[in-house]
Image (spheres, rainbow, N blue to C red):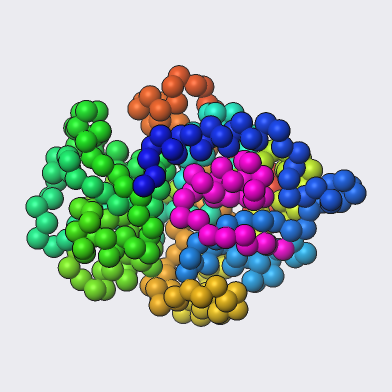
Amino acid sequence: MTTRRSTLALLGAAVLSASGLSACGDGDAAAAGRQATELRYQGSVGTVTPAELAEDLGYLGDVKLKWIGNTISGPQDIQAATTGDIDFGGAFNGAIVKLAANRAPIKAVIGYYGVDKDSYIGFYVLDGSPITSPKDLIGKKIGVNTLGAHAEAITKTYLSRAGLSDAEIQQVELVVVPPVNTEQSLRQRQIDVAQLGGTLRDKALDRGGIHPLYTDFELLGPFTAGSYVFREDFLKKNPDTVKTFVSGVGKAIEWSRSTPREQVIARFRQILAERARNEDDSQLKYWKSYGVNGRAGVIEEKEFATWIEWLTGTGELKGKNVEATDIFTNRYNTAAGGAA
């Protein structure tokens, strides 16, 4: 079971390891004065990320992606990018803020997932559950994909808006459950509330017997929730590679918006079949959008300022001064007039 302590320990280890990096992942290319043409990354089971879609559509040009495994945790993904185990990672913007507050040498370059009326994260209970209000969550277990990220921020927002004290909020237990197992854990009553999003949410709703207690869309409306990050040394040595990647991902996001949904899903099925990772594609029929709020993933200052303010208010930044404009850049995104 992942704990808050282990999550924070990983964050610290990531920052310490990053201090000794020398652009891992593009070593030979950098030594020869060339820019990297291969980007290592982690994927998600049964899902086609915007980066993977961009490569399949041919929007990345000569830049190739190298899949090294899957993750269910945004904080773990950006930690891996910080330590050089991968070249780029993605996470909830609040998790990026916390890593940046610990002086991790990373920069957010494009939004890649978000919240809208079709793509949102809900927190579901079984029909007939005695849990009907925030107060009812005291002493209960909520299954989430990871700690210290989107689900935790939304849950604490829900609880604090309802007037629960810090002591009461501490009694609401967040437990880590792989997303593909969360619905089953709820139905088997191993947890009291299940975080469900995207295609897994709609697949669970199709089976019936559950309903939402709260959702991020109801609480905050539409917003871009997470961004891809690179290490600053990688950006410095590979500006053209990053510009190709960011602009290609932005084009893929817009392609997914402008293309008929059935065609997008068909493309996803093709990608899953061709990459042959033994994945179930049955949930793809429920896909509706990536939820990115801005055009082509262009980042707005408020997408980080909101979480800086919230984390400062909860004391999680421990008095550290963090500026939103220091955490992200749009200079690699041609949709924003990027001139890298």
Quarter where residue 165 is shown: top left
Residue 94, image x, y percentages = 45, 39
Residue 326, image x, y percentages = 60, 31
Q: Nearer the viewer, residue 83 or 97?
A: 83
Residue occupying image coordinates x 44% and y 75%: 280
Q: Is residue 65 magenta?
A: yes
Residue 232 seen by the camera: yes
Quarter where residue 183 is shown: bottom left
Q: Is residue 79 magenta?
A: yes
Residue occupying image coordinates x 75% and y 53%: 241
Q: Nearer the viewer, residue 334 or 18?
A: 18
Q: Where are the magenta residues, as a range?
A: 64-90
Residue 197 lies left or right of residue 251; in this view the side is left
Quadrant of the drawing holding the C terminus = top right
State the residue lying farthest toward the top: 319
Residue occupying image coordinates x 31% and y 55%: 195
Residue 50 lies left or right of residue 314; in this view the side is right
